[in-house]
Image (cartoon, rainbow, N blue to C red):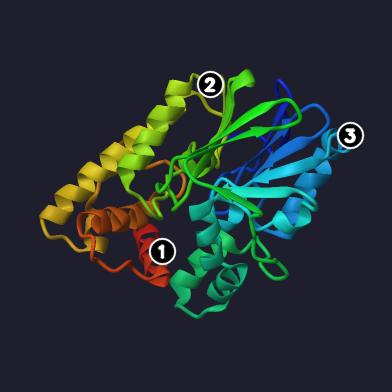
Amino acid sequence: MSYDEGLFDVGEGLHAYLQPDGGWGWSNAGLVVGGEQSLLVDTLFDLKLTATMLERMAPVTGPRPIRTLVNTHANGDHCYGNQLVEGADVIASAASAAEMAELPPAGLAALMAGDFGETTNAYLAEAFGAFEFNGIEPPRPTTTFTSSLSLDVDGRAVELIEVGPAHTAGDVLVHVPDAKAIFTGDILFIGGTPLIWNGPVENWIAACDLIIGLGCDVIVPGHGPLTDHAGVAAVSDYLHYVRSEAVARYEAGLPLFDAARDIELGPYEDWLDWERIVINVDSIYRELEPNREPTHIVDLFRMMAELKLHK
């Protein structure tokens, strides 16, 4: 799915910052402009990318500085650049704040430096080799909340709605009612495969229903191009399909990798990073078997690498 990179005015004092191709690490961000200040939705995966984004936003944020930064969730591609947004109140759900401490930049740097075999290392390099994880201070929110939080961005109402656990432990939607707009974080991957790190899937499907119910005209996903209600429905349909297929294979006794390999993706086989089916099946298996140990991250990447190699 082709779309352009950069900062886009989406109307009503809102801007979307998009990063093609929307695959591993190439996330989106957003800007909400109030009277004399702005709210930033997410930073990017490393300091260089975040610095470039902030520079491009400077014509807007110079006269209306960023006083609030909302992290939609704990994945590094949405918060590792936080340290460059000086003086802002950094807001996240309490669950995301706790998860940030468990996902430090040093962990990704160590993963990239590991020796896990040629196929896995090549896959990791393809996914994350463009990013620099050294010198990043772990994100530390200054304000946390649960369920919901209403903000006043210098006279402009912004609603934060916690819909996690879903993609991660504490996913948050950023709703701007007067503009009929929403920034969804990674509740939406458009043109790319949704990634179920946490689950349950039912919460994620409910979040999609909530987005559609809000009736927004502007929908900025966490990855991929701007979308509409049909794009939201496509994500929901994928989640319904994968859950059904994974449950059938769990009940048939198939091990994780065999189940992931056996699922025919049909209309979703051309979505970017389709091999994430491995992680998604693993999460659904854990839903079905609550005492099941999570599969080690290296093993998940090894299985994805093997699946993609032998497509």
Q: Vertically, is 15 above or below 261? A: above
Which residue corresponds to mark 2?
216
Which mark sits nearer the N-terminus, 2 or 3? Answer: 3
Q: Vertically, is 206 above or below 216? A: below
Callout 1: SS: helix
Callout 2: SS: loop
* Mark sitting on residue 225: none
Q: Vertically, is 225 above or below 177? A: below
Callout 1: 10 Å neighbours few (<14), some, many (20+)? many
Residue at coordinates 33% horizontally, 57% vertically from top-left? Answer: 278
Judge left or right: residue 20 versus residue 253: right
Q: Is residue 268 visible?
A: no
**Cα distance in 3D space between marks 1 and 3:** 47 Å
Image location of residue 71, percent across then percent down: 61, 48
Task: Check disc 2 and give the amino acid type.
Answer: Cys
Q: Is residue 35 visible?
A: yes
Task: Check disc 1 and give the amino acid type.
Answer: Ala
Are dots 1 and 3 in contact, CB under 8 Å? no
Residue at coordinates 79% horizontally, 49% vertically from top-left? Answer: 52
* Mark sitting on residue 63: 3
**Cα distance in 3D space between marks 1 and 2:** 37 Å
Which residue corresponds to mark 1?
305
Image location of residue 164, percent across then percent down: 43, 45
Residue at coordinates 44% horizontally, 40% vertically from top-left? Answer: 163
Q: Vertically, is 159 above or below 54? A: above
Judge left or right: residue 124 versus residue 11: left
**Cα distance in 3D space between marks 2 and 3:** 28 Å
Image location of residue 230, percent across then percent down: 43, 24
Task: Check disc 3 and give the amino acid type.
Answer: Pro
Callout 3: 10 Å neighbours few (<14), some, many (20+)? few
Residue at coordinates 42% horizontally, 68% vertically from top-left? Answer: 297
Q: Of 131 and 123, which appears nearest the observer?
A: 131
